[in-house]
Image (cartoon, rainbow, N blue to C red):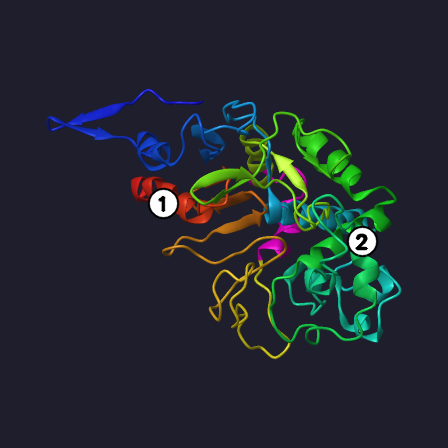
Amino acid sequence: MLRSTLTFLLLGGVLLAQPADKLDGLFAPLATGRTPGLAVMVRQNGKTLAQRAYGVRDLRSAQPNDASTNFRLASFTKQFTAMSVMLLVHDGKLRYAQTLEELLPGFPSYARAITLRHLLTHTSGVPDYEDAMDSRQYSPEHQIQDAEVLALLQKQATPKFTAGARWDYSNSAYVLLGLIVAKASGMSFDNFVAQRIFKPLGMTNSLMYRKGQGTVVNRAYGHSKRAGAFVETDQSSTSATLGDGGIYSSLNDLAKWDDALRKHTLLSESEMAPALVPATLASGAPTLWPPTPGEDNLNPGKPVAYGFGWFLDPYRGHPRMWHTGSTSGFRTVIERFPKEGLTVVVLCNRTDLDAAALALQAADFYLKASN
């Protein structure tokens, strides 16, 4: 495990802990050398201020989590999917106004009104594949694949709503985006991400993973707590889909991703700008989380701001871009505060921790310190 040597400032005879030192007080009580745990990173203006890791990658080997441990990012992946689309827009192979019917022929007529921009911003109205799939057909051993998601969605006669009429978080849309990237680029989606994002940035241990295809080095396995004990719950029936949540990555590699976003390594600032503009509805009404609670519904009925693969809601007056990830055995989050140059990443290989809440608690130490 990574641990810091406590450092203090002596002011008026009182020892004051620096923000980095407070992280251990927040995170260390959450895991032991006999439990799954988490990894935490705080960066500011391109410098890593703190890295911590707690607990183990899995209960079988009891190898400790560290900065090279690869966690399943789940929906944290969506920012990489959006970046892939934007890179193809840069290449002239895609346009934000292109329709789903044009990009992936075979949908019912409602696809004529759904654009690439609608898919990116969760305003498409594409049905949820998880609701349409037969739970008896799929399992952690027999997982639904992207091509099967496409075939399933193309059979849905009606959309959830007319494109642009409301906002509704959509894993289906991001699976479709991965398929669109593959078709437009002429290579598999996982290969595109590897060649156009991971390789140029030196993210050498990050990958899109499907069970039985490839190897995740330094792999963390997901866990859940049942009857007071941790059990491995690493895969689900939807763990093979890519664009909505298929990436594994580590603190070491995500530091490089953070640098690329800060320096505009992959896209110029002007090309990245559309990703950071909140979606608007055709009616001009505000974008809101759906009123009915659900697993992917973080704030039922509350306002939401979403661009391309990024939530854009401010936090305590601080502009931010962020995204969580939640899947079988894992909870993850990235919180970026561009004005302060601050980034916090929390990766958990257990489901009983609230990664987003923990990341904001950690951010508070630094936001207060910078004021």
With respect to residue 295, does 27 lie above or below? Answer: above
For badge 2, the amino acid type reads Ile
Figure quadrant of residue 368: top left
Considering depth in this image, is 367 or 57 the residue closer to the camera?
Answer: 57
Q: Which mark is residue 180?
A: 2
The stretch of residues the image draws in magenta is 262-276
Quadrant of the drawing holding the C terminus: top left
Q: Is residue 317 visible?
A: yes
Furthest toward the front, the residue is 227
Q: Residues within 10 Å of mark 2 (few under 14, many from 20)?
A: many
Q: Is residue 337 visible?
A: no
- Per the model, the C-alpha gap separating discs 2 and 1 is 37 Å
With respect to residue 149, does 31 lie above or below? Answer: above
Find numbered disc 2 in the image and state the secondary structure of the residue it sits on: helix
Q: Residues within 10 Å of mark 1 (few under 14, many from 20)?
A: some
Considering depth in this image, is 259 or 313 the residue closer to the camera?
Answer: 313
The residue pinned by badge 1 equals 361
Figure quadrant of residue 342: top left
Picture coordinates of residue 181, whole percent (x, y):
79, 49
Q: Residue at x 47, y 29 (%)?
A: 47
Picture coordinates of residue 57, whole percent (x, y):
54, 29
Is 367 inside the magenta-drawn segment? no
For badge 1, the amino acid type reads Gln
Tell me which secondary structure the magenta stretch mostly adopts.
helix
